[in-house]
Image: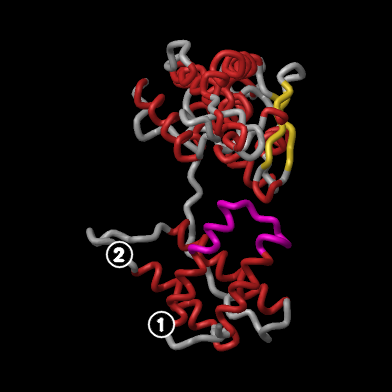
Amino acid sequence: MDELSRLLIEHATWLQVERGLAVNSLAAYRRDLSRYESFVRSRGINDASAVAEATVSAYVDHLKRARDDEGKPRYAPASIARALVAVRSFHRFCRDEGFVAMDPSEEVGAPRVPQGIPKALTEEEIESLLDSVEGSDPRALRDRAILETLYGTGSRISELVGLDREDLDLEDGVVRVFGKGSKERVVPIGRSAREAVSDYLQRGRPALERPSTRRVPGDPVFLNARGGRLTRQSCWKIVTAAGDRVGLSGRLSPHVLRHSCATHMIEHGADIRVVQELLGHASLSTTQVYTKVSPARLRAVYELAHPRARATARRE
């Protein structure tokens, strides 16, 4: 094992043990750094101390120039920016731990990532979506509970499928979720979602249980047809299938329900710091994107609220 391989392993252990990153985040770092390692080795570099700023800049340019079979950019600006975050994390770790003298990635700029406004559904679309799951069979009860919980709590898909029954307190209307980096938070769950989850637990989940369920780690709330814990991929399919039924094909994902939860709360007057706590955002700036509104809504609120917005409000 050469020095580069050793430091990459040391860094991966540090991410897991010291920073406590979630499984999905660790996998993303592993993919990005594996790609970076291949690039660095292709230039004859086998030691982190031999990497220069020009090497990191060349890697960013390499990602920008990469094209797929149709000649389109292989990596979006956000993907390149994320890849550079992983590279910076690795080189900063090597410097801070004293393995190398300098961080060659420190001054390398990432591509500008356009900040888009989350495409939340309207409240009417949410109503149609939540009404789209019909029937009282176990899967229908489960799927309805999933949709209601994602929208009702603003949870991430990984947080939802990771729920155990001990995390639910339906009587008090709260749910304990474990977010990024295994950070725990307690969030409210509304009446509609509580009723859907309770109905599923009483009439749906028992029918999905199998002998193998007892061997599943934890005590998962949401089960698949084989009695195991529902996966992120399966949950994603459930959500998008519901969207297809009400004409939301291509617009709906679990994260859109999270966006919609936050956006609708802001529109109904929720304090942004409360929404930050609900969503588990470490930084308020992440939550602030939900305060962006359309020009039409901005004008409507302005005309209602500003004392001199209308010409009739003139003094004699």
In the rendered image, the quadrant that contains the C terminus is: top right
The type of residue carrying mark 2 is Arg
Q: Residues within 10 Å of mark 1 (few under 14, many from 20)?
A: few
Residue indicated by mark 1: 42
Q: Using the image as rendered, state which of residue 266 and residue 53 is in the foreground.
A: 53
Residue at image position (53%, 63%) is: 30
At mark 2, the secondary structure is: loop
Residue indicated by mark 2: 67
- Principal secondary structure, stretch drawn in magenta: helix
The type of residue carrying mark 1 is Ser
Label 2, label 1: how far apart the Cα atoms are: 19 Å
Q: Using the image as rendered, state which of residue 156 and residue 126 is in the foreground.
A: 156
- Above or below, 1 against 253 in this view is below
Residue 303 location, x and y as percent? 57, 22
Q: Using the image as rendered, state which of residue 49 and residue 127 is in the foreground.
A: 49
Q: Is residue 249 left or right of residue 215?
A: left
Tell me which numbered mark, 2 or 1, is placed earlier along the sequence. 1
Residue at image position (63%, 51%) is: 22
Point out the stretch of residues depicted in magenta.
15-31
Q: Is residue 262 left or right of residue 120?
A: right
Can I make out residue 255 in this image?
yes
Residue at image position (58%, 41%) is: 289
